[in-house]
Amino acid sequence: MLKKILIASIFMGIITGCQQDDALPGEDLTVTEIVEAELPQTASNFILTNFEGEVITSAFRINDGGTVSFEANLTNDMNLTFAANGRLVAFGEDGAEVDCEGKHRRHGAFGKSPEKSDKDHPKPTLLELKDLPAKAVNYLKEKYPNNEILKIIFLERNELNQYHVLVKEIGIVVFDDAGTFVKLKEKPERPCANFQKIEIDALPAAITSYIEANYPDNEILRARKGTRNDKVEIHVLVKEVGVLIFNGEGVFIELKTCGMDKD
Protein backbone atom coordinates (compact mmCIF):
# COMPACT_ATOMS: atom_id res chain seq x y z
CA MET A 1 0.00 0.00 0.00
CA LEU A 2 1.63 3.18 1.01
CA LYS A 3 5.20 2.02 1.05
CA LYS A 4 8.46 3.76 0.31
CA ILE A 5 8.44 4.22 -3.53
CA LEU A 6 10.89 2.68 -5.77
CA ILE A 7 9.66 5.07 -8.25
CA ALA A 8 9.47 8.78 -8.44
CA SER A 9 11.55 8.11 -11.53
CA ILE A 10 10.11 4.61 -12.16
CA PHE A 11 7.13 4.22 -14.41
CA MET A 12 6.45 7.89 -15.03
CA GLY A 13 6.53 9.39 -18.48
CA ILE A 14 2.91 9.03 -19.50
CA ILE A 15 1.90 11.60 -22.17
CA THR A 16 3.93 14.77 -21.74
CA GLY A 17 3.19 18.42 -22.36
CA CYS A 18 -0.56 17.98 -22.71
CA GLN A 19 -2.27 21.29 -22.05
CA GLN A 20 -5.84 21.01 -20.85
CA ASP A 21 -8.31 23.89 -20.85
CA ASP A 22 -10.69 22.72 -18.15
CA ALA A 23 -11.20 25.73 -15.91
CA LEU A 24 -14.48 26.31 -14.15
CA PRO A 25 -16.56 29.26 -15.30
CA GLY A 26 -15.01 32.47 -14.01
CA GLU A 27 -11.80 30.78 -12.88
CA ASP A 28 -8.36 31.30 -14.35
CA LEU A 29 -7.14 27.74 -14.02
CA THR A 30 -4.91 25.72 -16.32
CA VAL A 31 -3.71 22.14 -15.95
CA THR A 32 -0.58 20.88 -17.72
CA GLU A 33 0.49 17.24 -17.67
CA ILE A 34 4.17 16.86 -16.81
CA VAL A 35 6.75 14.12 -16.33
CA GLU A 36 8.21 13.21 -12.95
CA ALA A 37 11.38 15.15 -13.64
CA GLU A 38 9.31 18.34 -13.80
CA LEU A 39 8.01 17.93 -10.26
CA PRO A 40 9.79 20.04 -7.63
CA GLN A 41 12.79 18.16 -6.30
CA THR A 42 11.35 18.24 -2.78
CA ALA A 43 8.19 16.52 -4.05
CA SER A 44 10.18 13.85 -5.90
CA ASN A 45 12.27 13.23 -2.79
CA PHE A 46 9.16 12.84 -0.65
CA ILE A 47 7.73 10.21 -2.99
CA LEU A 48 11.05 8.44 -3.33
CA THR A 49 11.47 8.30 0.46
CA ASN A 50 7.98 7.30 1.51
CA PHE A 51 6.52 4.93 -1.08
CA GLU A 52 7.57 1.54 -2.40
CA GLY A 53 6.00 -0.77 -4.94
CA GLU A 54 3.79 1.97 -6.37
CA VAL A 55 3.83 3.60 -9.80
CA ILE A 56 3.34 7.26 -10.65
CA THR A 57 0.68 7.10 -13.35
CA SER A 58 0.33 10.83 -13.98
CA ALA A 59 1.49 14.21 -12.70
CA PHE A 60 0.22 17.74 -13.30
CA ARG A 61 1.20 21.38 -12.87
CA ILE A 62 -1.81 23.48 -11.86
CA ASN A 63 -1.91 27.24 -12.21
CA ASP A 64 -4.93 28.68 -10.44
CA GLY A 65 -4.89 32.42 -11.00
CA GLY A 66 -1.14 32.58 -10.51
CA THR A 67 -0.97 30.11 -7.62
CA VAL A 68 1.03 27.09 -8.75
CA SER A 69 0.70 23.59 -7.30
CA PHE A 70 1.58 20.08 -8.40
CA GLU A 71 -0.29 16.79 -8.17
CA ALA A 72 1.03 13.25 -8.55
CA ASN A 73 -1.18 10.17 -8.85
CA LEU A 74 0.05 6.71 -7.82
CA THR A 75 -1.20 3.27 -8.78
CA ASN A 76 -2.83 2.75 -5.38
CA ASP A 77 -5.24 5.59 -6.23
CA MET A 78 -3.36 7.90 -3.89
CA ASN A 79 -3.21 11.55 -4.91
CA LEU A 80 -0.48 13.77 -3.51
CA THR A 81 -0.73 17.55 -3.78
CA PHE A 82 2.37 19.72 -3.44
CA ALA A 83 2.90 23.46 -3.16
CA ALA A 84 5.10 25.23 -5.70
CA ASN A 85 8.14 24.60 -3.49
CA GLY A 86 7.41 20.85 -3.34
CA ARG A 87 5.98 20.78 0.19
CA LEU A 88 3.16 18.24 0.62
CA VAL A 89 -0.04 20.14 1.36
CA ALA A 90 -2.81 17.58 0.79
CA PHE A 91 -3.41 13.96 -0.12
CA GLY A 92 -6.22 11.67 -1.26
CA GLU A 93 -9.34 12.66 -3.18
CA ASP A 94 -10.18 15.33 -0.62
CA GLY A 95 -6.98 17.13 -1.51
CA ALA A 96 -7.16 16.70 -5.27
CA GLU A 97 -7.78 19.64 -7.59
CA VAL A 98 -7.77 17.34 -10.63
CA ASP A 99 -8.35 13.64 -11.23
CA CYS A 100 -5.73 11.22 -12.56
CA GLU A 101 -6.43 12.33 -16.13
CA GLY A 102 -6.02 16.02 -15.33
CA LYS A 103 -9.73 16.87 -15.40
CA HIS A 104 -10.77 19.49 -12.86
CA ARG A 105 -12.91 18.07 -10.06
CA ARG A 106 -15.98 20.25 -10.50
CA HIS A 107 -17.49 18.97 -7.28
CA GLY A 108 -14.31 17.37 -6.05
CA ALA A 109 -11.68 18.80 -3.81
CA PHE A 110 -13.11 19.76 -0.44
CA GLY A 111 -16.65 19.42 -1.80
CA LYS A 112 -16.35 22.72 -3.63
CA SER A 113 -18.80 23.63 -6.36
CA PRO A 114 -18.88 26.73 -8.59
CA GLU A 115 -21.50 28.48 -6.50
CA LYS A 116 -19.68 27.85 -3.23
CA SER A 117 -17.00 30.15 -1.90
CA ASP A 118 -13.66 29.28 -0.34
CA LYS A 119 -15.16 30.41 2.96
CA ASP A 120 -17.74 27.61 2.70
CA HIS A 121 -15.16 25.03 1.60
CA PRO A 122 -11.66 26.03 2.73
CA LYS A 123 -8.67 24.00 1.65
CA PRO A 124 -6.95 21.63 4.09
CA THR A 125 -5.17 23.06 7.11
CA LEU A 126 -1.81 21.45 7.87
CA LEU A 127 -1.43 20.30 11.47
CA GLU A 128 1.07 18.62 13.76
CA LEU A 129 0.50 15.59 15.96
CA LYS A 130 -0.01 17.80 19.01
CA ASP A 131 -2.96 19.43 17.25
CA LEU A 132 -4.93 16.17 17.02
CA PRO A 133 -7.52 15.34 19.68
CA ALA A 134 -6.07 13.05 22.34
CA LYS A 135 -8.50 10.32 21.32
CA ALA A 136 -7.07 10.26 17.79
CA VAL A 137 -3.49 10.34 19.03
CA ASN A 138 -4.14 7.36 21.30
CA TYR A 139 -5.76 5.44 18.45
CA LEU A 140 -2.74 5.97 16.21
CA LYS A 141 -0.30 4.96 18.94
CA GLU A 142 -2.29 1.80 19.67
CA LYS A 143 -2.94 0.71 16.08
CA TYR A 144 0.24 1.88 14.35
CA PRO A 145 2.98 2.23 16.98
CA ASN A 146 5.78 1.56 14.49
CA ASN A 147 4.47 3.54 11.51
CA GLU A 148 5.60 7.07 10.75
CA ILE A 149 2.99 9.81 10.45
CA LEU A 150 3.80 11.63 7.23
CA LYS A 151 1.27 14.44 7.29
CA ILE A 152 -1.89 15.59 9.06
CA ILE A 153 -4.58 17.85 7.59
CA PHE A 154 -7.87 19.17 8.92
CA LEU A 155 -10.79 19.46 6.49
CA GLU A 156 -13.56 21.84 7.46
CA ARG A 157 -16.64 21.29 5.31
CA ASN A 158 -19.85 22.66 6.76
CA GLU A 159 -21.12 19.98 9.16
CA LEU A 160 -18.47 17.43 8.17
CA ASN A 161 -15.17 18.32 9.80
CA GLN A 162 -12.47 15.66 9.73
CA TYR A 163 -8.82 15.00 10.48
CA HIS A 164 -6.98 13.07 7.76
CA VAL A 165 -3.72 11.44 8.82
CA LEU A 166 -1.33 10.02 6.21
CA VAL A 167 0.40 7.07 7.88
CA LYS A 168 3.38 5.47 6.17
CA GLU A 169 2.70 1.95 4.85
CA ILE A 170 -0.94 2.21 5.99
CA GLY A 171 -2.84 4.95 4.18
CA ILE A 172 -5.21 7.72 5.17
CA VAL A 173 -6.67 7.34 8.67
CA VAL A 174 -9.76 9.54 9.07
CA PHE A 175 -11.12 10.89 12.38
CA ASP A 176 -14.10 13.14 13.08
CA ASP A 177 -13.61 16.50 14.77
CA ALA A 178 -13.84 14.84 18.19
CA GLY A 179 -11.02 12.43 17.36
CA THR A 180 -13.21 9.34 16.86
CA PHE A 181 -11.97 6.92 14.18
CA VAL A 182 -14.11 7.04 11.03
CA LYS A 183 -12.38 4.90 8.41
CA LEU A 184 -9.17 3.81 6.73
CA LYS A 185 -9.17 5.09 3.17
CA GLU A 186 -6.55 2.77 1.73
CA LYS A 187 -6.41 -1.01 1.58
CA PRO A 188 -4.04 -2.56 4.13
CA GLU A 189 -2.54 -4.77 1.44
CA ARG A 190 -1.50 -3.55 -1.98
CA PRO A 191 -1.82 -5.87 -5.01
CA CYS A 192 1.57 -4.79 -6.38
CA ALA A 193 3.56 -4.64 -3.14
CA ASN A 194 5.79 -7.57 -4.08
CA PHE A 195 6.96 -6.22 -7.45
CA GLN A 196 10.68 -5.89 -8.02
CA LYS A 197 12.62 -3.96 -10.65
CA ILE A 198 13.99 -5.99 -13.55
CA GLU A 199 16.53 -4.83 -16.10
CA ILE A 200 15.26 -3.88 -19.54
CA ASP A 201 17.66 -6.27 -21.26
CA ALA A 202 16.21 -9.10 -19.13
CA LEU A 203 12.70 -8.66 -20.54
CA PRO A 204 11.29 -11.68 -22.43
CA ALA A 205 11.73 -11.44 -26.19
CA ALA A 206 7.95 -11.52 -26.61
CA ILE A 207 7.69 -8.24 -24.72
CA THR A 208 10.45 -6.40 -26.53
CA SER A 209 9.09 -7.62 -29.86
CA TYR A 210 5.59 -6.39 -28.96
CA ILE A 211 6.88 -2.95 -28.02
CA GLU A 212 9.09 -2.68 -31.10
CA ALA A 213 6.14 -3.58 -33.33
CA ASN A 214 3.61 -1.25 -31.69
CA TYR A 215 5.72 1.61 -30.32
CA PRO A 216 8.92 1.65 -32.41
CA ASP A 217 9.70 5.30 -31.62
CA ASN A 218 9.05 5.17 -27.86
CA GLU A 219 11.72 4.45 -25.29
CA ILE A 220 11.36 1.72 -22.63
CA LEU A 221 12.03 3.52 -19.35
CA ARG A 222 11.67 0.88 -16.64
CA ALA A 223 10.24 -2.55 -15.89
CA ARG A 224 9.19 -4.60 -12.88
CA LYS A 225 7.95 -8.12 -12.22
CA GLY A 226 5.76 -9.59 -9.50
CA THR A 227 2.48 -11.24 -8.59
CA ARG A 228 -0.91 -9.58 -8.62
CA ASN A 229 -4.14 -11.45 -7.90
CA ASP A 230 -2.08 -14.67 -7.74
CA LYS A 231 -0.81 -14.20 -11.30
CA VAL A 232 2.69 -13.27 -12.43
CA GLU A 233 2.81 -9.96 -14.31
CA ILE A 234 5.47 -7.81 -15.92
CA HIS A 235 4.87 -4.05 -16.03
CA VAL A 236 6.82 -1.98 -18.54
CA LEU A 237 6.81 1.82 -18.65
CA VAL A 238 7.07 3.13 -22.21
CA LYS A 239 7.72 6.84 -22.65
CA GLU A 240 4.71 8.88 -23.78
CA VAL A 241 2.60 5.70 -23.88
CA GLY A 242 2.00 4.41 -20.36
CA VAL A 243 2.42 1.18 -18.43
CA LEU A 244 2.10 -1.95 -20.56
CA ILE A 245 1.09 -5.04 -18.59
CA PHE A 246 2.12 -8.52 -19.72
CA ASN A 247 1.70 -11.95 -18.17
CA GLY A 248 4.70 -13.97 -17.03
CA GLU A 249 5.22 -15.39 -20.52
CA GLY A 250 5.27 -11.95 -22.10
CA VAL A 251 1.76 -11.96 -23.56
CA PHE A 252 0.23 -8.47 -23.62
CA ILE A 253 -2.74 -7.95 -21.27
CA GLU A 254 -3.54 -4.24 -21.17
CA LEU A 255 -2.29 -0.65 -21.20
CA LYS A 256 -2.63 1.46 -18.08
CA THR A 257 -2.33 5.23 -18.02
CA CYS A 258 -4.49 6.24 -15.06
CA GLY A 259 -4.89 4.30 -11.82
CA MET A 260 -3.72 0.70 -12.13
CA ASP A 261 -5.35 -0.40 -8.88
CA LYS A 262 -8.40 -1.96 -10.45
CA ASP A 263 -8.77 -5.58 -9.29
Image (cartoon, helix red, strand yellow):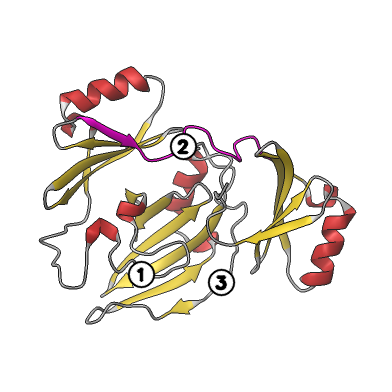
**Image: 98 above or below 138:** below
Q: Earlier in the sequence, mark 3 or mark 1?
A: 3
Q: Which picture quadrant has residue 117?
A: bottom left
Q: Which residue is mark 2?
A: 187
Q: Label 1: how many residues lie within 10 Å, few (<14), some (14-19) or many (20+)?
A: many
Residue 10 sits inside the magenta stretch: no
**Image: 99 above or below 222:** below
Q: Secondary structure at mark 1?
A: loop
Residue 187 sits inside the magenta stretch: yes
Check residue 104 in the rendering and tell me which mark sits there, or answer none: 1
Magenta range is: 180-197
Report how many numbered discs are placed on residues in the image: 3
Q: Which picture quadrant has residue 83?
A: bottom left
Q: Secondary structure at mark 3?
A: loop
Q: Nearer the viewer, residue 237 or 87?
A: 237
Q: Nearer the viewer, mark 3 or mark 1?
A: 1
